[in-house]
Amino acid sequence: MLEQLQQVFREVFKDDALIITESTSAKDIKMWDSLTHLELIAAVETAFSIKFTFNEVMMFSNVGEMMALLEKKTKS
């Protein structure tokens, strides 16, 4: 899942060399602002064929938390 998510991040941030880990957060990626956050959420929803609620989106503080919710949503 991390590899697939990393590809989404690379596409959204237009950086083929971007490496993410579970602890990666907005402060770690220079171009991660509120607009790219929305683009990222939309791209993740499309890539994984899921939908996040507003509250779920607001809870993410790092990639690991996003992955944990993705795992729950893709198993149900």
Image: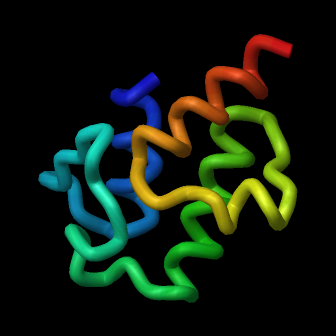
Tell whether 60 sits left or right of 2: right
Q: How many marks?
A: 0
Instruction: Determine the residue positioned at 62% across, 48% down.
Output: 44
Q: Where residue 45 sits in the image (x, y, percent)?
A: 72, 47
Q: What residue is rendered at 80% in x and 62% in y?
A: 55
3 versus 21 height, above or below: above
Residue at (13% x, 53% y) in the render? 17
Tell which of 28 and 43 is nearer to you.
Answer: 28
Q: Is residue 17 left or right of residue 73?
A: left
Residue 5 percent location from the top left of the image: 45, 39
Say which residue appears at 38% left-offset and 78% top-offset: 32
Q: Quadrant of the C terminus?
A: top right
The picture places residue 25, in percent across and down from the top left corner, at 33, 62
Quarter-of-image position of residue 59: bottom right
> Percent from the top left, x then y, of residue 64?
42, 39
Q: Nearer the viewer, residue 28 or 3?
A: 28
- Residue 46 position (above or below residue 49): below
